[in-house]
Image: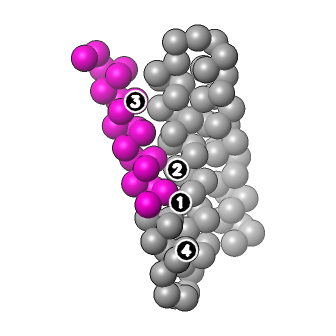
Amino acid sequence: MNLDLFLSILLSFSAGCYVLMAVRLLRGDSEIGGFQLGATFIVIGLWVLGGAVEMMATSFAIFSVGRTAHFVGTALVPVTLLIC
């Protein structure tokens, strides 16, 4: 197992954890800031998963999908923090 594969698996697991935390915050009790933090965690999960797809890519098309998800996540995190 090389380092790129290990890091991409670690990033994928981290993205899944962000999404699980977001689901818990979004479906839980109506606590102050729960929705805002949940929405931000979903976007951060997309951001991290895009980085993992970039590292695992075997073709330019898959790399471009990962790069796009990474850029969209990077652009949307401050927007979600501002709007929510």
Residue at image point 43% right, 50% down: 16
Q: In x, y percent, where is residue 35?
A: 60, 76
Q: Residue furthest top?
A: 59
Answer whether labels 2 and 1 touch (C-beta < 8 Å).
yes
Which residue has dot 2 on it? 45
Looking at the picture, how far across and down is residue 39, in whole percent?
61, 65
Judging from the image, what secondary structure is the residue with disc 3 in?
Answer: helix
Q: Residues within 10 Å of mark 4 (few under 14, many from 20)?
A: some
Q: Where is 33 relative to 10, above or below?
A: below
Q: On the image, numbered disc 4 is attached to which residue?
A: 26
- C-alpha distance separating marks 1 and 3: 19 Å
SS class, disc 4: helix
Binning the other alpha carbons within 10 Å of mark 2 as few (below 14), some (14 to 19) or many (20 upward) gives many
Can you give x and y, in whole percent of width and height, for residue 77 in the image? 64, 54
Q: What span is in magenta?
A: 1-20
Give the quarter of the image for residue 2: top left
Magenta region includes residue 73: no
* Left or right: residue 35 compared with residue 13: right
* Mark 3 vs mark 4, CA separation in Å: 27 Å
> Which dot marks residue 41?
1
Dot 1 falls on a residue whose secondary structure is helix
Could you tell me the amino acid type at mark 3?
Ser
Looking at the image, residue 71 sits to the left or right of residue 57; the answer is right
The residue under label 3 is: 8
Sequence order check: which comes first, mark 3 or mark 4? 3
Question: Left or right of 74: which side holds 44?
Answer: left
